Image (tube, helix red, strand yellow):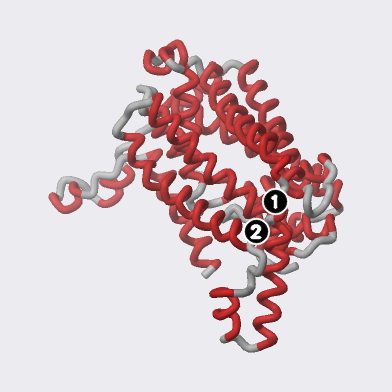
Amino acid sequence: MKNKRIIFGFVLSIFFTYLIVWKPHPSEIFSGDSSFLNAFFGDSRLEFSKIWEHTLKASPFWLMICLILTPLHVLVRSHRWSLLLRPVVKLKLIDSFSLQTLGYFASTVFPLRIGEVVRAILLGKKAKIKNSTAIANVVLERLIDGLSLLGVFVIVGIIFQSDKIGMFREGVLIMAGLSMIALSVVVYFSFARAPFGGVTGKILSYLPDVMRERIIEVLKGFIAGFSMLKSTRHYPLVTLETILIWVLYTAQEFSVILAFGFHKSAPLIAEAPLTAALVILVINAVALSVPSAPGGLGTFHAASIFGLGLFGIAEDPAVGFALVLHAITTGYFVLAGILFMWREGLEIGQLKNLGNGEI
C-alpha cells in the first residue's frame, strides 16, 4: 500500500509538471492532424527565456525577507508545539525547533510528507515518552491546522469572490470535516471518565485478551498525547500563535509578490496585494495536502500558477514566482535540516527508516 501511495505521489507530481510545461491536444491524434509526440509535446506553454528574465528582475531585498520569514514561522510553530506538549513533557524551545526542522527536512527530501512521522518518533526518543503519545500530539497539532485552514478559507471566500476558487471548497471542507470528526473522537477519549467502557468496551470485549490489552495500552498513550485539551490556560496563546503562523505564511507569499513586482504590473493584485497572497496561500495549502513527490514538486508549482492566474498573471512570470518561492523554502529546510541532523547525531538514512516505521 505504501509503495502504491509513493508511486501515485510521483505520478501526480509528474502529471502536474507536464501540464505546467506543455499544452496537450489529444483530439489532434484522432483527427489525424498530428502525431503523438506533437499532440502531447509540440505546444509548450512556457518561454524559458522569459521565465529567467522575470526571475532575474526579482528584488533581492524582498526575497531575503521571504527567507527570513521561513525560520520565523518555524519558530512560532515550535513554540506552539511546546505548549501542546506541556501537559506531557516540558520540551525546550531549541529542541522543539530542531525536531520541527527535521520534520520539514524529511518532508522535503522524502515523498508523502513523512516528516510528521519522523518528528513524532524523534520526540518520543528525546522526551522518553511513548511513540503513541508523541504521534497523538503531532496529530492534535495537525487537527488544529486543518480546522484553522477552514477559518482562513472562509475569510478568503468573503474577501475574494471568484467561481474558480470554489473548486477548492470541497477539498477544504473534506479536510475540515475529517479534522472535526477526529477532534470529536479525541475530545471524547480525553474527557470521558471511563473511555474504555460503554460501546468502546463492548467492542474491545470481542477481541482476544492480549490484543485488547495491547490496544488499550496504545490508546492510553494516545490519550496522554491529547492531554493539552484539558489545559485550558494555554488555549488563548495557542489560538494567537495559530493566527500568527497564518500571518507569517501570508507574509511569505506577499514578499515574493512584491519581489516580482506583481503589485505594480497586475491591476487586480495592485487593488489588494494581501488578498492575493492569502488566496494563493490557501490554494497552495490545499494542493500540498495531496500525496506528491518530495517537497510538493509539481503540485505546489501548479497551485501557485493557478492562484496567480486568478489575478491575471501570465504563466511565465507565475512559473518564476513558484520556482523562486519553492527554492527559498526547500533550500532553507535542506540546509537547516543538515545542520540539525548534525546536532541530533542523525544521518539521512536514519530519518528515512524512521519515516518508514523502522524504529
- Mark 1 lies on a secondary structure that is helix
Residue 140 in percent (x, y) is at 63, 52
At 65% from the left edge and 59% from the top edge, which residue is drawn? 190
Q: Is residue 183 above or below residue 316?
A: below
Q: Is residue 161 above or below residue 126?
A: above
- Identify the residue position indicated by label 1 in the image: 230
At 30% from the left edge and 38% from the top edge, which residue is drawn? 43
Q: Measure how far apart labels 1 and 2 are at the Cα level.
A: 8 Å
The one of 231 and 9 positioned closer to us in this rendering: 231
- Identify the residue position indicated by label 2 in the image: 191
The one of 291 and 214 positioned closer to us in this rendering: 214
At 50% from the left edge and 52% from the top edge, which residue is drawn? 180
Is the C-beta separation of discs 1 and 2 under 8 Å? Answer: yes
Task: Indicate left or right for 187 with 97 as reference.
Answer: left
Q: Amino acid at mark 2?
A: Phe
At 30% from the left edge and 47% from the top edge, which residue is drawn? 40
Q: Is residue 84 above or below residue 315?
A: below
Residue 256 in percent (x, y) is at 55, 23
Task: Indicate left or right for 254 with 162 as reference.
Answer: right
Query: Residue 348's quadrant in the figure?
Result: bottom right
